[in-house]
């Protein structure tokens, strides 16, 4: 055998994962410690020169009554998947490990792209072929049926470009967004939004309460089960300093002042147009030249249209002032997110938003702030996380795809979820019962949600 495998220390595993191109926050002892309902083990693979060539956090969980465990390796083990010999020997090790630890099956979902936008990653298809040769069973999904999303948007941050400063890179990234995304970011700034961020060390408890309330509002609106505050607090604590809470705050005073500025500018513009209209009418009355009369009448029509448009804008601004008046002297937070970073990658993990002041576009400004912070952290990838692979506009998840697409990232499909089965009967039983359990749980949640 060319490789040996053993349990590793947190320092060994985390150092290897942090510096690997396949490193992932889910493949760290921090994540293993956070997933308290699972038992976590750290495994290392070494070559014949005693160099670490593979690291793996394997999570196991007991199946009641059956006296068996299930295993999960989130985002797959960290290694060179094109090294078939390493893959083969580690798979053999996992089979023995499963037998010794009463594990019925182990699921992996490697961080390996099979498609980016419309381009197939041909060389990675061999990895799929090799996994299947070694006995892994594929379990594909278009939406969110699997443990991790199979489709994501990933933004290349170009931080490896040595000829540009971070500020120049940020401007390039901003300019790469769709015009609608750039406009919405500008709107957020004009409407008085600002973005705050907190690690566990700087966190004030009321900030987590605010995020929890935003999550509750979002869960009720979008009909999904919400994690409790303690879950997010434990995440911030256990993954510290690689986990941050972001919140978008609304300033009534800034919004009001900017609306007043627009209002005054609109009034000045309207007065100028009306003055020009008066001059045009005087010119019309003072000429008998038919050609001039036609031209002047056309200009008068255009000015009347401009007056009408400005009057509508004036009314809209006045209405907006009245609408936002209820937020005077109040502390208002409109959206929030949980953000992770590890090595040279960053992830947008959880997001939430309020039902009020949605026209201020808080989610766009928040995303841009997290992207800018990722650039400052020298990350070369910002991962927007899951979207549906079903791009039918009738799909309820299409709006999420449309939102993330506006930031011009790559639409990525991973190779998918694969399972190494040691006990086929328990695996089939689990696959049959677990989805029904989820359906029952979701049905109860939806009924309770409607009663609130």
Image (cartoon, rainbow, N blue to C red):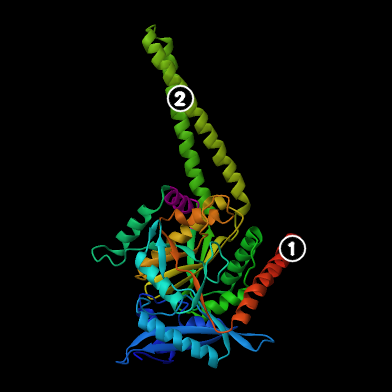
Please state, as top left, top right, bottom left or bottom right, where the C terminus lies in the image: bottom right
What is the spatial separation of the Cα atoms under label 1 and label 2, in whole angstroms? 56 Å
Residue 415 visible, this angle = yes
At 43% from the left and 56% from the top, the residue drawn is 407
**Which comes sooner in the sequence, label 1 or label 2?**
2
Out of 285 and 109, give the one closest to the viewer. Answer: 109
Magenta segment: does it hold 186?
A: yes
- What's the magenta region? 180-193
The label nearer to you, 1 versus 2, is 1
Magenta segment: does it hold 332?
A: no
Task: Using the image, tell me which numbered label, if any, was put on residue 134.
Answer: none
Image coords of residue 201 (percent x, y): 49, 79
Q: In this figure, which residue is indicated by the disc labeled 2?
A: 303
Please state, as top left, top right, bottom left or bottom right, where the N terminus lies in the image: bottom left
At 39% from the left and 16% from the top, the residue drawn is 295
Q: Is residue 123 above or below residue 396?
A: below
Q: In this figure, which residue is indicated by the disc labeled 1?
A: 447
Image coords of residue 208 (percent x, y): 58, 71
């Amino acid at each position: 055998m060319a490789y040996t495998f053993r349990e590793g220390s947190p320092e060994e595993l985390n150092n290897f994962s942090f510096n690997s191109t396949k490193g992932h926050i889910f493949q760290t002892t921090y994540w293993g410690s956070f997933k308290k309902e699972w038992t976590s083990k750290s495994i290392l693979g070494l070559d014949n020169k005693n160099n670490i060539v593979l690291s793996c956090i394997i999570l196991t969980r007991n199946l009641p009554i059956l006296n068996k465990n299930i295993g999960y390796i989130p985002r797959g083990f960290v290694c060179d998947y094109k090294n078939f010999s390493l893959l083969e020997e580690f798979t053999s090790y996992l089979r023995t490990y499963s037998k010794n630890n009463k594990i019925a099956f182990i699921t992996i979902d490697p961080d390996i792209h099979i498609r980016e936008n419309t381009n197939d990653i041909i060389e990675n298809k061999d990895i799929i072929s090799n996994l299947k040769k070694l006995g892994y069973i594929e379990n594909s999904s278009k939406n969110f049926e699997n443990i991790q999303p199979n489709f994501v948007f990933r933004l290349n941050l170009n931080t490896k470009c040595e000829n540009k400063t971070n500020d120049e890179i940020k401007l390039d990234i901003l300019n790469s967004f769709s015009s609608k995304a750039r406009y919405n970011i500008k709107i957020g700034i004009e409407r008085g939004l600002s973005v705050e961020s907190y690690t566990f060390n700087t966190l004030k408890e009321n900030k987590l309460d605010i995020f929890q309330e935003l999550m509750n509002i979002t869960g009720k609106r979008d009909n999904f089960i919400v994690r409790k505050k303690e879950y997010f607090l434990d995440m911030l604590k256990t993954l510290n300093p690689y986990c941050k809470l972001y919140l978008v705050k609304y300033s009534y005073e800034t919004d009001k002042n900017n609306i007043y500025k627009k209002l005054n500018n609109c009034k000045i513009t309207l007065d100028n147009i009306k003055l020009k209209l008066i001059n045009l009418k005087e010119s019309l009355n003072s000429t008998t030249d038919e050609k001039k009369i036609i031209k002047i009448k056309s200009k008068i029509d255009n000015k009347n249209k401009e007056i009408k448009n400005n009057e509508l804008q004036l009314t809209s601004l006045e209405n907006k002032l009245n609408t936002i008046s209820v937020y005077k002297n109040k502390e208002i937070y409109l959206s929030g997110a949980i953000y992770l970073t590890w090595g040279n990658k960053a992830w947008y993990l959880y997001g939430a938003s309020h039902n009020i002041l949605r026209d201020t576009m808080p989610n766009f400004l928040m995303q841009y702030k997290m992207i800018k912070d990722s650039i400052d952290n020298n990350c070369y990838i910002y991962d927007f996380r899951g979207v549906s692979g079903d791009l039918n506009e009738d799909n309820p998840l299409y709006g999420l795809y449309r939102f993330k697409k506006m930031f011009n990232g790559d639409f990525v499909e991973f190779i998918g979820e694969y399972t190494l089965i040691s006990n086929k009967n328990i695996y089939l039983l689990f696959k049959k019962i677990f989805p029904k359990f989820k359906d029952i749980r979701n049905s109860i949640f939806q009924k309770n949600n409607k009663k609130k």
